[in-house]
Amino acid sequence: MKHKITFIVLVLLSLTAMLPYTHASSGSVHIQGPIIAATQSNVTYKVYVDEYFERYKCEMFIAGQNLTGAKPLNSVSKTSNDGKFEFEITTPKVPQTLYISFRIYGYTGSKIKILEREITLSVVSPLPVKVKIKNPNSYEIKDVVLRFYVDGEYIGNTTVDKVAANSTKTVVYRWIPQNLQKGKHTLKIVIESHGIVFENGKTAYSYEFYYGEKPSYDYIYYSGLALLIALSTVFSLMLLGRKGRKSAPAPKWKK
């Protein structure tokens, strides 16, 4: 293909909207947010307290094996009059289980009540889908939407803010496979915005990829090679045997 679309599946646009979410409750504390996320991605958690207090305060802090690249590294405190809070976390660079703790203080007059809740977040390495799109027009196009499908099943979308006139742009979609079996799969990308195409001039592109470790067929090659060598050796020995019999001196009784 003259214009080959660049597509790379490696071990990397955030997939937060497509990930499984938790709605954890512990007494009067409710937490909404993802239970799995890609490394170095931003995730948001919403905390609700349905027990009445005059005012509320919530502290959040994270813990893990290796917090390199994670934010915030220190605890974060927020206050509220209605018991609602929102916290954003940047996941670390290293895949692991992240422990996120919330401590809520409820104030009523001079009394303080403390409520606590801890959840876990699985931080995993994503598979980046990298493609190039092109704007062949003489004007800029904004809010370009790309939709992604694996084996015909919708897995998510991403929006590119803008693509300049007569230019190309690389888009990286960080995909976290969910229950994807090892083997060959087909990924399809569809551009839903008018005026934008892939490098081949089309608005849809399909690509086959292998998820997991590819099966090795080396043993077939080496087994066949070994068999060929063995057969060659036997054949050579047979030829040498025949030559040896022809060159041997005649028995004395035949003289």
Image (cartoon, grey):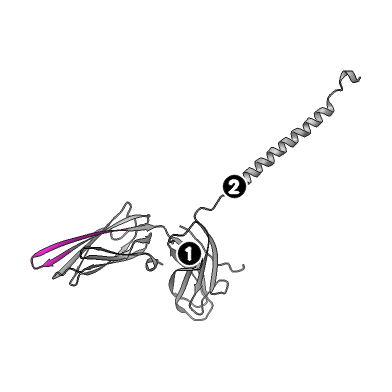
In this figure, which residue is indicated by the disc labeled 2?
218
Disc 2 from disc 1: Cα separation: 29 Å
Asked whether the beta carbons under mark 2 and mark 1 sit within 8 Å of each other, the answer is: no
Considering the whole magenta stretch, tell me its main secondary structure: strand
Q: Which residues are magenta?
A: 105-120
> For the point 37% across and 68% down, which residue is it?
17
Residue 101 lies left or right of residue 193; in this view the side is left
- Numbered disc in front, either 2 or 1: 2
Q: Please provide percent x and percent y for residue 128.
A: 46, 62
Is 234 located above or below residue 45 in the figure? above
In this picture, is 138 found above or below 178?
A: below
The mark tally for this picture is: 2
Name which quarter of the figure residue 45 lies in.
Answer: bottom left
Q: Residues within 10 Å of mark 2 (few under 14, many from 20)?
A: few
The residue lying toward the viewer, choosing from 67 and 97, is 97
Q: Give left or right: position of 191 versus 80.
A: right
Q: Give the SS element for disc 1.
A: strand
The kind of residue on which mark 1 rests is Val
**Depth check, front residue: 251 or 64:** 251
Quarter-of-image position of residue 74:
bottom left
* Residue at the image point whose x is 47% and y is 72% from the top: 146
Q: Quadrant of the C terminus?
A: top right
Task: Please provide percent x and percent y for residue 228.
Answer: 69, 41
The image shows residue 189 at horizontal and vertical percentages of 50, 70
Could you say which is closer to the camera, residue 39 or residue 254?
254
- Residue designated by label 1: 129
Q: Which label belongs to residue 210? A: none
- Extreme bottom residue here? 139
Q: Is residue 109 magenta?
A: yes
Is 108 one of the magenta-colored residues? yes
